Image (tube, grey):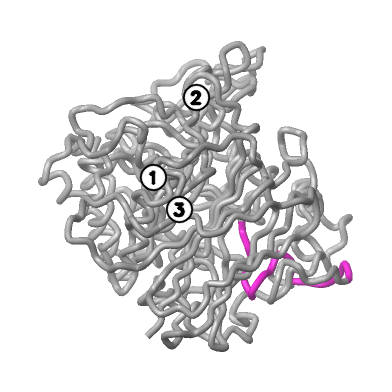
């Protein structure tokens, strides 16, 4: 799986083909993790694999015939495999933002996070301890044996090594590499030379912004020189402090190396989703810990409401016609994810162990039992609440990275839905998430959405119900003259569907008509518990996510899913 695709509306792979095949270059059923492979009997599985298989069955994702074509394919025999495939892709859930005892503000062992991620249905995880002088000096090396041990112990979960980059002149970002002999040395050099904390380059200055671009260039060069097979960067909690300006995001996005983009997207929804649970039962802060205000380095154009989450999602993503849409309207790829940012887990009983010195050891002592439930924490375990679903060609590190770069991603909170299959079709061909449908001008185009509703209770113990699905559409208007633009005047909700069933599958179709100019479509869905007119007005978004209330935002009562876009490019 070492191939790579240059994806997006103008450079793309799968979106510009007739899709009759089942992507035979992916892994065969026999190479799938044992929990996925229904030809392996339950009694042959380890306890962790049995737990994973039980989770897949509850979600309706095992032996349910999710074969090429549609999530709605009728059930087939229990021996049918590969499972969890739609349109030839294996949909793998994961989390790219996880901390351990190797973070100055972390607590858990790597194996604790991986064990919990595996238990909660994660197929891939990225360990992203904070970039700082101590981590650059010894932590990046010391964590690697723990990651390799976790890979061996949990063979059905892909565990990447990465770090949380202090982006010079900006916020944080996940940087992670394909495993290999140079994974530590490349990350160590990158952190030493380009981390904003290590280099004292946090302020929003042109020199620091240039250092961030140089860092991405360094990573691109490592691929070119075959030091590592692949590297990706995703911006974390981008609107939290207002310091990721639109022009910086565009500059990161446009760095390429060997035909591959390094910075490919951002957290559409941040971690720390438990932080808004009211005091007495919770931390009593803001969902996502988005409770700041403009500072000296903040971009002055951002409104005050951008410093809060909206339905648990970052303002850049949640605003129809906002910053994310302005990026998509340029016709260039920029994807969204959702993850845990797990440091200290809500209602857990562990505390840091005694002894040790982080500055000397590069890690905290192993956690121990603390004797009480810690309700004043804001995080969940990986997979417990937030999930990023990636359409991969097979089960492997390169396949996941290819799927992320290609934008075959949808995200959800609270297991609101269990499967999503999106197809834009016209002129005898089709494209899915992250892809582009190239058709002749005037071709009739249809969007088909197949949804697998919640297949059982989520980790909070209830079965979530999807109330509504929205289709957002915008025109592709090309590169912006002002790279600090963060609005897209043509983007709006063009169709809403009420979902009047609690289980099973639903097919939605939307007719784009005869398309004569470039457009994109993306999806959003909600449990309907909290909605409000969007920031751009009712004509743009009549019932979008409501701004989250600081100190009283129970995340389980406000669930959403979002998909990445599909472009239609007539010529």
**Frontmost residue, 155 versus 263:** 263
Give the x, y percent position of residue 135: 34, 37
Residue hosting label 3? 336
Question: What SS does tag 1 mark?
Answer: loop
**Frontmost residue, 561 versus 132:** 561
Q: Nearer the viewer, mark 3 or mark 2?
A: 2
Q: Earlier in the sequence, mark 1 or mark 2?
A: 1
| Dot label at residue 428 | none
| Mark 3 residue crowding within 10 angstroms, few (<14) / some (14–19) / many (20+) | many
User: Does residue 89 show up magenta in the picture?
Assistant: yes
Is mark 1 in CB contact (under 8 Å) with mark 3? no
Q: Earlier in the sequence, mark 3 or mark 2?
A: 3
- Magenta span covers which residues? 77-92
Task: Judge from the rendering whether residue 254 lies leftward or rightward of residue 230; answer left or right.
Answer: left
Cα distance between the residues tagged 3 and 2:
23 Å
- In the picture shown, does residue 13 fall above or below 304? below
| Mark 2 residue crowding within 10 angstroms, few (<14) / some (14–19) / many (20+) | some
Q: Quadrant of residue 353?
A: top right
- In the picture shown, does residue 487 fall above or below 423? above
Give the x, y percent position of residue 441: 41, 85
Q: Nearer the viewer, mark 1 or mark 3?
A: 1
Cα distance between the residues tagged 1 and 2:
20 Å
The answer to whether residue 297 of the structure is visible from this angle is yes
**Frontmost residue, 68 versus 131:** 68
Question: What SS does tag 2 mark?
Answer: loop
The answer to whether residue 175 of the structure is visible from this angle is no
Residue hosting label 1? 536
Q: Earlier in the sequence, mark 1 or mark 3?
A: 3
Residue at image point 57% right, 22% down: 277
Cα distance between the residues tagged 1 and 3:
20 Å
């Amino acid at each position: 799986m070492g191939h790579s695709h240059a994806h997006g509306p103008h450079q793309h792979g799968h979106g510009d083909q007739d899709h009759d095949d089942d992507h035979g270059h992916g892994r065969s059923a026999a190479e799938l993790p044992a929990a996925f492979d229904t030809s392996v009997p339950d009694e042959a599985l380890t306890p962790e694999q049995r737990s994973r298989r039980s989770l897949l069955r509850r979600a309706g994702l095992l032996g349910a015939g999710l074969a090429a074509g549609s999530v709605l394919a009728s059930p087939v025999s229990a021996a049918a495999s590969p499972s969890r495939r739609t349109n030839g892709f294996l949909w793998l859930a994961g989390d790219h933002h996880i901390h351990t005892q190797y973070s100055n503000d972390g607590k858990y062992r790597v194996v604790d996070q991986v064990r919990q991620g595996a238990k909660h249905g994660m197929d891939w995880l990225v360990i992203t301890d904070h970039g700082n002088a101590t981590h650059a000096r010894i932590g990046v090396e010391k964590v690697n044996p723990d990651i390799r041990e976790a890979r061996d112990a949990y063979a059905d979960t892909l565990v990447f090594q990465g770090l949380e980059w202090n982006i010079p002149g900006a916020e944080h970002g996940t940087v992670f590499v394909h495993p290999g002999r140079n994974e530590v040395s490349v990350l160590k050099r990158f952190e030493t030379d380009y981390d904003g904390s290590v280099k004292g380059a946090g302020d929003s200055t042109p020199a620091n912004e240039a250092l961030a671009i140089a860092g991405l260039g360094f990573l691109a060069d490592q691929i070119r020189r075959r030091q590592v097979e692949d590297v990706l960067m995703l911006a974390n909690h981008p609107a939290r402090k207002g310091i990721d300006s639109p022009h910086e995001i565009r500059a990161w996005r446009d760095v390429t190396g060997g035909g591959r983009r390094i910075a490919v997207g951002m957290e559409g929804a941040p971690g720390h989703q438990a932080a808004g649970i009211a005091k007495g039962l919770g931390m009593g802060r803001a969902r996502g810990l988005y409770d700041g205000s403009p500072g000296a380095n903040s971009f002055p154009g951002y409104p005050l409401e951008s410093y809060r989450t909206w339905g648990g999602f970052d303002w850049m993503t949640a605003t129809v016609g906002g910053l994310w849409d302005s990026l998509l309207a340029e016709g260039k790829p920029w994807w969204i994810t959702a993850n845990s940012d797990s440091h200290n887990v809500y209602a857990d009983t562990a505390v840091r162990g005694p002894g040790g010195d982080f500055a000397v050891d590069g890690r905290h002592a192993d956690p121990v039992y603390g004797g009480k439930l810690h309700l004043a924490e804001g995080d969940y375990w990986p997979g417990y609440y937030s999930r990023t679903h990636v359409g991969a060609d097979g089960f492997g590190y390169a396949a996941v990275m290819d799927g992320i770069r290609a934008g075959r991603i949808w995200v959800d909170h609270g297991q609101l839905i269990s499967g999503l299959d999106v197809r834009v079709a016209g002129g005898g061909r089709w494209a899915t998430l992250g892809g582009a449908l190239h058709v002749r001008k005037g071709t009739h185009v249809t969007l088909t959405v197949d949804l697998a509703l919640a297949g059982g209770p989520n980790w909070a113990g209830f079965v979530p119900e999807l109330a509504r699905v929205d289709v957002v559409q915008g025109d592709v208007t090309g590169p912006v003259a002002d790279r600090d633009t963060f609005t897209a005047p043509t983007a709006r909700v063009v169709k809403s569907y009420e979902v009047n069933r609690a289980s099973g599958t639903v097919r939605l179709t939307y007719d784009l008509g005869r398309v004569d100019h470039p457009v994109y479509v993306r999806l959003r869905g909600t449990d309907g518990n909290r909605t409000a007119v969007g920031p751009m007005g009712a004509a743009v978004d009549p019932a979008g996510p409501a701004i989250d209330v600081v100190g009283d935002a129970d995340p389980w009562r406000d669930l959403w899913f979002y998909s990445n876009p599909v472009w239609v490019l007539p010529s």
